[in-house]
Amino acid sequence: MNLRALFAISFSGLMGPHGPTSTMTQSSPPEPSRSLAEPKHYKIKVCLIGEQGVGKTSLVHRFVSGSFDESYIRTLGMRVSRKRVTLDRPSGSVHADLMVSDIMGNRTFLNLFKEAYFEAIQGVLAVFDVTQRDTLLALEAWISALLDRVGLVPVLTLGNKIDIPGRRETSDAEVAEVLRRYNCPVQYTSAKTGENVEDSFRGLAEAILGEDSGL
Ligand code: GDP
Ligand code: MG
């Protein structure tokens, strides 16, 4: 099943932390920037959430520059990176500039800065490390904080570091159980090898633009 189909399922059945979907606001698809030139051009703002060390900064680096940096660089504060993707739509291709915000992976920090971090966010990658079960369990708190602040936006969960052989601590059943309440689709990635990284960012962009955005 492709990512777009997964998102369609998720958002039809999503329950927020405090009640049913009907109490939450669905953000409308972004407007294309005004230009006579084709193809259409969108700006999309997304961010990453998840515990420190799960690979958020490495995933952004892989997506934006196509490489992996072994040295552990702690993100200080928040950084915004930009990458343009071209998406094939039924009515032709469109450009989307993804503004990707990466936060220092610590929930205390998020509590201090969540107003700024979640400002105008249209979609989220919620990342855990498949070799550290705690990082999966922690996603619930991250997603709750997000939904409280932002409301209903597309959230794609990423199980990262699938390249590490024999160290997997999380089963598909456990992942499904933790995410059951939110019904987010899951994709498995490696920032190290690049597996599924580009597809995940593109899948999120597709979900944000939506089926019915008039493209
Ligand atoms: P962040 O705190 O979530 O931003 O995590 P980082 O991107 O700083 O990564 C934390 C550590 O995990 C670093 O040592 C990275 O080199 C490593 N890392 C990140 N992604 C992967 C991956 O997909 N595979 C492997 N083997 N290591 C990774
Ligand atoms: Mg980081």
Image (cartoon, helix red, strand yellow):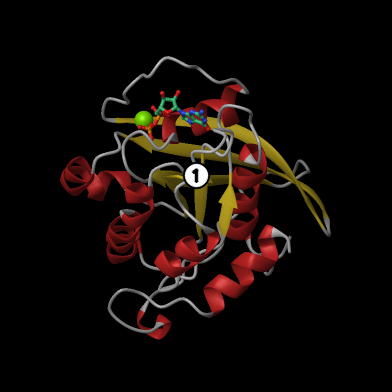
Q: Nearer the viewer, residue 113 or 54?
A: 54
Residue 199, x across and y down, in percent: 67, 44
Check the image and report above or below for 172 versus 9.
Answer: above
Q: Place residue 52 in its image quadrant.
A: top left
Q: Is residue 213 above or below residue 181?
A: above
At 37% across and 46% down in the image, what residue appears? 49
The amino acid pointed to by label 1 is: Arg
Q: Position of residue 63 (x, y in %)?
A: 59, 31
Q: Is residue 209 visible?
A: yes
Residue 148 picture quarter: bottom left
Q: Residues within 10 Å of mark 1 (few under 14, many from 20)?
A: some
Report the residue at 67% width, 59% height from top.
3
Q: Quadrant location of residue 41?
A: top right
76 vs 27, left or right, is left
Nearer to me, 150 or 56 = 56
Q: How many marks?
A: 1
In which quadrant of this rendering is ligand 1 seen? top left
Residue at image position (78%, 43%) is 38
- Residue, disc 1: 168
Q: Position of residue 122 (x, y in %)?
A: 47, 55
Return the residue nearer the eye: 108 or 205. Answer: 108
User: Which of the image's four quarters has the C terminus?
Assistant: bottom right
Decide if residue 174 is on the left or right side of residue 62: left
Residue 42 appears anywhere in the view:
no
In the visual, does 54 lie left or right of 106? right
Residue 44 image position (x, y, % from top left): 53, 47
In this view, the residue in front, 106 or 37, is: 106
Task: Name the secondary structure under disc 1.
Answer: loop
